[in-house]
Image: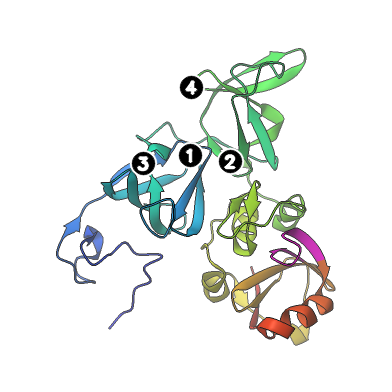
Amino acid sequence: MTSYDKRLHAFRTDLADLRLKDAVAAPRYVASRSAVVAAPVADMRAGPNQQSGLNTQLQRGDAVRVFDEADGFCWVQAERDSYVGYVAADALAAVQPAVSHLVAAPRTFIYPGPDLKKPRAGALSMGVGLAVTGFAETRGLRYALLSDGTAVVEKHLVPISELGGDYVAIAESLVGTPYLWGGTTAFGIDCSGLVQLSMRMTGRDVLRDSDMQAEHLGVAIDSGAGLRRGDLVFWKGHVAIMTDPETILHANGHTMMVSLENFADAVARIGYLYGQPTGYRRP
């Protein structure tokens, strides 16, 4: 019998995704409705309340399937990585125009109009998807205009059609970002979130958690043949990115930020409590 991961398939004891009708038993099956994240960041929790643990985060522009709504929370599945969980209902909106650009700077501000001297209207992280409707220039600086009249500095964005490049360089731009369990943004991020976000900025969507990445991302390699920039090192519950054969980059609870560390030193430090690396993969 096939085993389904509840992190990636929407089923509970009381209801399930209609697409799983022939796969899992449930008293009720429901078709989803489409929605999009409207808040800058939306926490996806393990349960429908603010006290439930943070499993992951969605960002403005992310599309979701909504299966249930009650007591201010929606039970949803993210379209991009299939993750299932609970998101505050007021963080979602009806489907918006298609995303045309992603925020490419680690962080940027939203302004009420195309002028950096106006009081900021909010802040966005790398990876946020925006539907740009036009452009304007004020005092020599170009802004991307959004449908609600707000504006973002154009040089902080990248068109979806131009995603690419070295995902490690993108991850390196996030050095110093605070560590946040379940975080996926440049405001706070965890180890697998760093891999997911930096790869997304090159046009590659990957699964969310480190165990999923250890099983499905790229191909397994033998460390004895030599590691190189971009290879991934996995421990139980942790992942790090090789920046060169001697150095890793990872979001970690030791420094509580995204940081560089000598690989051999990290193996010794982590091994003391959590054991040796469990595998290596080349994306």
Q: Amino acid at mark 3?
A: Ala
Per the model, the C-alpha gap separating discs 2 and 3 is 31 Å
State the predominant SS element of the stretch in magenta.
strand
Q: Which residues are magenta?
A: 249-260
Q: Which mark is residue 161?
A: 2
Residue 280: x %, y % from top left: 67, 78
Which one is in front in this view, the residue at disc 2 or the one at disc 4?
4
Q: Quadrant of the C terminus?
A: bottom right
* Number of marks present in the image shown: 4
Mark 2 or mark 4, earlier in chain: 4
Q: Amino acid at mark 1?
A: Gly
Give me the residue at 39% from left, 37% from top. 90
Q: Secondary structure at mark 4?
A: loop
Q: Which mark is residue 61?
A: 1
Question: What residue is pinned by disc 4?
Answer: 147
Which one is in front in this view, the residue at disc 3 or the one at disc 4?
3
Mark 4 or mark 1, earlier in chain: 1
